[in-house]
Amino acid sequence: MSERDDIGRARAGQGPAGFGETRPVDPLPETRVARPGYPADAAASPQPRRRPGRVIDATRLWAGGFMAGVVAAGVAVVGLLIARGVLGIPVLVERKGHLVNASMVWYAVGAFLAAIVATGLLHGLLAGVPQPYRFFGWIVGLATAIAVLIPFTTGAKVESKVAVALINLAIGVCIGSIVSSIGRSAARVLDEPYGY
C-alpha cells in the first residue's frame, strides 16, 4: 500500500536503492549564511581588548609648557604686586627657620619651574598611563593644596599667610588648567589592539 502525503495524494514508491523518493522538502533549511567578507563564526568570536594609543606632538607640548611657565611667572609677579603694592601686606616665606620677604624673582622662577615639571609629568602620563588627565588633575590638585597650606604652618601674621596662600593657589590653578589644555591639543588618540 502506498503512503499518502499531507494532502492525501499517493506517493510514488521507493526503489531498492532509494531513488524515486518524492517526500516534501523543507523550504527553510536551518543554514547560517555569513555576510560577504566575514567568516561564518565572526559573531561568535570574542573581540580583542583595546586600549587608547596616543600620538604625542612633543614639540607642541613642550612649547606650550614653556609658555605656561611664562604665564605662571607672570601670575606670581602680579600676585606679589597686588599684595605688597596695593594692599600693603608683607609676603613672608620661611627659610631656614626664619621668616623673610619673598623675592619676586625667586617666586617667578619657582612658578616657571613648577610649570615645566607639570609639563614633564603630563608627558609621562600621556605616554603610558590610562586616563592621564585624571591622574594629572589629582596630582596638580594635591600639589596646589600643599602649596596653599604650607604658609599656615609658619609664624607669620594671618594676612601674610592668606596672601601667600592665594598667590600659590592662583599659580597652581594657572599651571593645571593651561598645561592640561595644551596636553589635549598636543596628543591625538588612536585605537590600537593589544593582548595578542
Image (tube, rainbow, N blue to C red):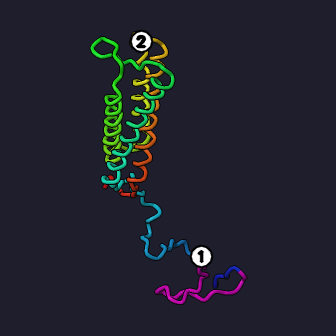
SS at mark 2?
A: loop
Q: How much space separates mark 1 and mark 2, taking CA atoms?
A: 89 Å
Determine if residue 151 is in view.
Answer: yes
Q: Is residue 29 above or below residue 174?
A: below
In-image side of 75 versus 61 (left or right):
right
Q: Residue at x 42, y 70 (%)?
A: 39
Q: Is residue 136 above or below residue 41?
A: above
Q: Which residue is mark 1?
A: 28
Q: Residue at x 46, y 25 (%)?
A: 85
| Extent of the magenta region | 7-28
**Circle nearer the viewer, 1 or 2:** 2
Q: Which residue is mark 2?
A: 156
The magenta stretch spans residue 169: no
Mark 1: few, some, or many residues within 10 Å (few <14, many ≥20)? few
**119 or 126, nearer to the observer:** 119
Q: Residue at x 44, y 33 (%)?
A: 78
> x, y percentage for residue 176?
43, 38
Mark 2: few, some, or many residues within 10 Å (few <14, many ≥20)? some
Going by the numbered disc 2, the residue's amino acid type is Ala
> x, y percentage for residue 120?
30, 42
Q: Is residue 102 above or below residue 188?
A: above
Determine if residue 165 is in view.
Answer: no
Check the picture and name the quadrant holding the C terminus: bottom left
Going by the numbered disc 1, the residue's amino acid type is Leu
The total of numbered circles placed on residues is: 2
Q: Residue at x 69, y 79 (%)?
A: 6
> x, y percentage for residue 106?
31, 28
**70 or 5, nearer to the observer:** 70
The magenta stretch spans residue 21: yes
Q: What label sits on residue 41 in the rendered view?
A: none
Residue, far top: 155
